[in-house]
Image (cartoon, grey):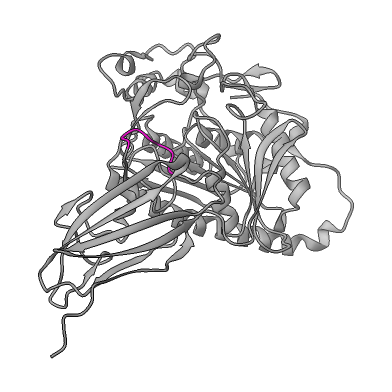
Amino acid sequence: MSGAPALSLSVMPADALIDVPRRIVLHGAPAGARVTIASRTERAHGALWHADATFVADADGVVDLSRDAPVSGSYAEVSALGLVWSQTPVDGKSRDVFPAPVTAPLVTTLSASVGDASVSARFTQRLAAEGVTRREIREQGLVGTLYLPPGEGPHPAVMVLNGSGGGINEPRAALYASRGYAAFALGYFKAPGLPDYISNTPLEYFEHGLRWLRDTVRPAHDFVALSGQSRGGELVLLLGATFPDLVSAVVGYVPSALVHSAQNAADPATGREGPTWLLNGKPLPHIWENNRTASWAPYDEGPPPHRHARAMLTALDDPDAVERARIRVERIRGPVMLLSAGDDGSWPSSRYSRMVAERLAAHGHPHPVEHLDFEHAGHAIVFPYVPTTQLVYAHPVSGRVSTGGGEPAANARADEQSWAAVQAFLARAVATQAARAARDVPAACAPSSDSRSGDTHDTDR
């Protein structure tokens, strides 16, 4: 008579990019037994993150996380990688979830126990595929990091811009490069050699970055997209409208339809109602400027965590101020993707995205416009299979304790669905530009004047 099957735990694939779904399956448990599976990952700066969930084995003694919902634990629904996105830091305070450097792997250990029996397995998530190269850029006044895909290229390009936390968004750039794009993560404050604050940032800096990227990587089909989140989402729409000849497509994560003041990333010398963006040395009008209804009270008052969006909503009640601050997105000469969150605690990205889409439609925008709005999700939409539990944070510049909103499970769904949609959107945009470039080849052989958009600037806001 044979004994009971040995307990085993498998993860497939065991080593892959971070955005690749995994299948986690346990075999050999007694039918109907309760099985607890725990995850443990060492993330940035050696911080440990963990989660656990208990399942009931089926009649064959199997637990399959892509099929089975836990009966208790860190998450509640069927989710193949719930044991990743539901992780929380062991120390209760860490927030950085990406490895340092981002080219290093993230290794998660799974431990399963059934009664006195236990078994373990490991899997690896990577932000950079084999052959992706990383180059720090500190030249011509630019501060950033360039990630290039394997192979000689040419590759289509993406410029990646961070939000009001500043710094250089290397994780997203590394993943873009792993999916075939020359990705330039450009810092503009809170990075080496740059200002500590977002206040009075000249848009010409980004124009220079776009030209440098084209000159450096010679992108396939001359395709250069912009990808930005939060204030970076505001910024990519603004850059597409200001330098339309330099931008092939725009991806705005939780963006704004309006120019905002410096807010939580402000230089204390100019304050949170001071200007953020300059063009030709002059501040762009912003929503808080001469606004008759705007009030910080809904954000400032009461105990933390504060909800910044409540103050932003008061500013929208002044239609004249809204119109003065509106980004002229109709000037963008390419497809636009908008990704918004229905429970955004930082600002009303769903409403802002609708404003952008409606304005583009009203002006007969000739390129595709896609808007995905994620119900119950919060401000922190990134990419799949990372922890989504840190909803409350101290702002990296102001230190204000706030909430980005959302629920961990909804945030995880937004991460997964948005990244798939962005990849499909960019693939279509590249294909469209490639077809256009192929049609224009004969004309390109003829001499032409320089039609770059940066020589003169229309400051009509």
Residue 62 vs 109, above or below: the answer is below
Quadrant, the N terminus? bottom left
Residue extent of the magenta highlight: 91-97
> Can you tell which quarter of the image residue 236 is in?
top right
Q: Is residue 96 magenta?
A: yes
> Can you tell which quarter of the image residue 213 is in?
top right
Residue 275 vs 158, above or below: the answer is above
Q: Look at 56% across and 17% down and name the residue there.
A: 275
Quadrant, the C terminus? top right
Q: Look at 67% across and 26% down and name the residue there.
A: 193
> Can you tell which quarter of the image residue 221 is in?
bottom right
| Count of residue discs | 0
Q: Is residue 133 left or right of residue 20?
A: right
Q: Is residue 136 magenta?
A: no
| Residue 382 seen from this side | yes
Residue 30 percent location from the top left of the image? 13, 73
Q: Nearer the viewer, residue 162 or 211?
A: 162
Q: Nearer the viewer, residue 155 or 367?
A: 155
Dominant secondary structure of the residues highlighted in magenta in the image: loop
Q: Is residue 5 left or right of residue 151?
A: left
Q: Nearer the viewer, residue 49 or 278?
A: 49
Q: Nearer the viewer, residue 195 or 435?
A: 195
Q: Look at 46% across and 26% down and name the residue there.
A: 396
Residue 353 percent location from the top left of the image? 43, 39
Residue 367 vs 204, above or below: the answer is below
